[in-house]
Structure formats: structure tokens, C-alpha cells
Image: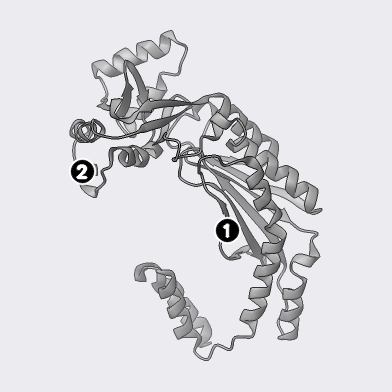
């Protein structure tokens, strides 16, 4: 999608160059801000095509030099505005969950009612909502309505030390300074999440033990590359997370190496805590490689039942598990 339409709910940015990814985050940071309000003063307003509200807002946007398509895109997607006193903010799709949380209501039935009814139900709940709300306004729309009390969401933007751009800048500095073969693979941005991948080749010590053990078991190790994925969000959908992985073989099969290193959004979170998480990355690989070595020593007497048990343990629905299970069954009986 054209970068001039970053405001669109459906925007998906894919960046092959690291500098382009970081520049995207910098630009979004410049066009974003936080606003603290009392939850009980928030109101939702339905907006439809051809309505008086649409006409007035488009006139206002034109006078202020803003893109009128922000309003059109909102009508196509959520059809909702957030009214704060006399100010209207278009609501982005990723903000809906946090608005429902502030209103203290949920349920599939809400999605089936008309937008005007939907807004009225939520407004009745917001009237009795307690505490403050923290609005994340990004690229002309509300991206989140979070808890604004001191014990709630850690407002990195207020602290001026922990925004998305800074997370990735620190990641680049640490990875390039501590992994000699570090190379950027790709970056991704959606309105509720930003993520990037780096390959950590050149660090033979990360996988040596596992490759040697594979050879001892008569297996030829496929080409394996350690890869790290880092994600973060400024909409409350996730903290700053570090996912160590392996990419194996010509098809680049991804092997997750256990649970990620997580840093949650909590009051007082500092960027130095994220730096501490980055320092655990090397050890995380070594621990995971050790666990993989242990798995090589586990004899599986009935691989078909074993795979079925693993899928059940992971909670994979049968309709999704059926095809890989049949494929595995075919391969195991060849």
C-alpha cells in the first residue's frame, strides 16, 4: 500500500531495508501522541456515508490540511468516532478491543447490532466507567484507549524513553555489537504491532553442540541459521518481546526455541530493562539447543500417536490438524 495511506486500517508495511523500517517508525512517532481523559467522559458516535457528521468532519479536515480519506476509511471499517468533549477522533479497528475493555463489556452479539445501537450500548457503559483513559492517537485515528491510572499501562511516550522506534534502535545496536554475523532480514508494521527479523549467522557456538549431536545420531544437519524476531506495540496488544528461532533447510522451516523473552507494559518500565532482556538472548539459544539435544535421546515408539498427542497438547483444532496428520501418516508408513 502507498505510504501516503499509512492512516488506513488495512495498512501493512513490509520493509526490506532496515533504514526504511526505522524511518517508518520515526515518521509514525512524529504523527502520534497520547491524551489522558476521564473514561466516563468518552462517547462513541456512529458515522455513515453521506451523513452530516461526515460532511462537517471532511470540511474541518480540509481546512486543517488533513487527508479527508481518513474519514472515508473510517466509515468503511469501524464506522465509529470517539467524541472527547467537542473533539471527534476517527476510531481505528485495532482500538475496538481496548474501548470494550474500558467500557467493561464484551460479547459476540455486539458485532451483530447496528452501529448506532452499538455506540449507544457502549456509551451507557462508559458513563459509569471508573478511572482515567489513555488515548493513543496515531496517523489521525484513535489506535487504543488504555487504562490511564498510575497502576495501569506504562506510558512510554510520557517517559520519553520507551517508544517503538527506541526499542528497535536499541535492538540494532545490541545485535550488531554482540553478534558478528548479524544481518537484517525484514521489518513489518501494522497499527497494532511492529516486528523485525535478524539472522545471527557467524555465531558457531550457538548451534555447535546440537549439530554434533545430530551427526552422532547419523543425521546430516541441514543448514541451520539462528534468527531472532523482536516485536512491540504501542496499543497495549503486547509488550517488547524477543523470540529466538532457528531457520532450517532450503525451505527455511522455522523452529521456535521455547517461550520468548517478554517485557510487559507496566508502570515504570524502562528501556534499560529491555536491554537486560537482550543480554539474555545468547544464553536462551544455548539453553534451547541443550533441550533439542535432550529430545534427540528420546525414543519415540509410536510416532503417529506421538504426533497426535502433541497436536492435542497444543490445542490445535481437529479441522486444522487433519491434513498435517494425514501427511505425517503417509510419510511414516512409506
Q: Residue furthest front?
A: 150
Q: Secondary structure at mark 2?
A: helix
Task: Name the residue located 40 percent from the left edge and 68 percent from the top edge.
Answer: 316
- Examine the image and state in which quarter residue 251 appears: bottom right
Classed neighbour count for the residue bearing mark 1: other residues with Cα under 10 Å, few (<14), some (14–19), many (≥20):
some
| Vertical arrangement, residue 196 with respect to residue 253, above or below | above
Whether residue 42 can be seen here: no
Res 112 label: 2
Give the labeled residue for mark 1: 260
Query: Residue 307: x and y, percent?
Result: 47, 79
Task: Name the residue located 71 percent from the left edge and 43 percent from the top edge.
Answer: 172
Which sits earlier in the primary sequence, circle 2 or circle 1?
2
In the rendered structure, the answer to whether residue 131 lies left or right of residue 1 reads left
| Vertical arrangement, residue 44 with respect to residue 180, above or below | above
- Examine the image and state in which quarter residue 162 appears: top right
State the CA–CA distance, disc 2 to disc 1: 36 Å
Classed neighbour count for the residue bearing mark 2: other residues with Cα under 10 Å, few (<14), some (14–19), many (≥20):
few
In the rendered structure, the answer to whether residue 45 lies left or right of residue 301 reads left
Query: Residue 58: x and y, percent?
Result: 36, 15
Task: Name the residue located 43 percent from the left edge and 74 percent from the top edge.
Answer: 313
Res 178 label: none
Q: Residue furthest top?
A: 63
Whether residue 208 can be seen here: yes
State if disc 1 and disc 2 touch (CB < 8 Å). no
Q: Secondary structure at mark 1?
A: loop
Query: Residue 304: x and y, percent?
Result: 47, 84
Query: Residue 131: x and y, percent?
Result: 34, 33
| Front of the two marks 2 and 1 | 1
Amino acid at each position: 500500500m502507498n505510504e501516503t495511506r499509512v492512516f488506513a486500517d488495512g495498512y501493512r508495511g513490509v520493509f526490506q531495508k532496515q533504514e526504511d523500517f526505522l524511518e517508518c517508525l520515526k515518521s509514525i512517532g512524529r504523527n502520534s501522541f497520547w491524551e489522558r481523559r476521564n473514561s466516563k467522559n468518552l462517547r462513541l458516535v456512529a458515522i455513515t456515508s453521506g451523513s452530516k457528521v461526515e460532511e462537517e468532519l471532511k470540511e474541518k479536515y480540509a481546512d486543517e490540511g488533513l487527508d479527508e480519506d481518513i474519514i472515508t476509511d473510517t466509515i468503511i471499517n469501524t464506522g465509529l468516532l470517539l467524541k472527547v468533549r467537542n473533539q471527534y477522533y476517527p476510531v481505528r479497528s485495532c482500538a475496538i478491543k481496548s474501548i470494550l475493555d474500558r467500557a467493561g463489556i464484551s460479547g459476540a452479539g455486539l458485532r451483530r447490532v447496528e452501529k448506532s445501537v452499538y455506540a449507544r450500548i457502549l456509551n451507557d457503559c462508559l458513563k459509569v466507567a471508573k478511572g482515567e483513559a489513555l488515548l493513543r492517537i496515531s496517523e489521525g485515528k484513535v489506535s487504543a484507549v488504555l487504562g490511564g491510572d498510575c497502576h495501569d499501562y506504562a506510558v512510554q511516550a510520557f517517559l520519553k524513553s520507551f517508544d517503538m522506534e527506541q526499542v528497535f534502535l536499541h535492538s540494532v545496536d545490541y545485535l550488531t555489537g554482540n553478534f558478528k554475523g548479524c544481518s537484517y532480514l525484514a521489518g513489518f508494521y501494522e497499527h497494532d504491532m511492529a516486528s523485525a527479523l535478524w539472522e545471527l549467522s557467524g555465531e558457531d557456538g550457538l548451534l555447535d553442540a546440537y549439530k554434533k549431536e545430530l551427526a552422532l545420531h547419523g543425521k546430516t544437519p541441514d543448514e541451520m541459521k539462528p534468527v531472532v524476531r523482536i516485536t512491540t506495540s504501542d496499543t497495549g496488544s503486547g509488550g517488547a518481546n524477543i523470540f529466538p528461532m532457528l531457520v532450517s533447510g532450503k525451505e527455511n522451516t522455522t523452529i521456535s526455541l521455547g517461550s520468548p523473552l517478554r517485557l510487559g507494559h507496566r508502570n515504570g518500565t524502562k528501556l534499560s530493562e529491555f536491554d537486560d532482556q537482550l543480554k539474555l538472548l545468547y544464553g536462551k539459544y544455548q539453553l534451547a539447543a541443550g533441550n533439542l539435544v535432550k529430545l534427540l535421546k528420546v525414543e519415540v515408539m509410536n510416532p503417529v500417536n506421538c504426533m497426535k498427542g502433541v497436536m492435542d497438547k497444543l490445542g490445535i483444532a481437529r479441522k486444522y490438524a487433519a491434513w498435517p496428520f494425514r501427511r505425517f501418516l503417509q510419510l511414516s508408513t512409506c
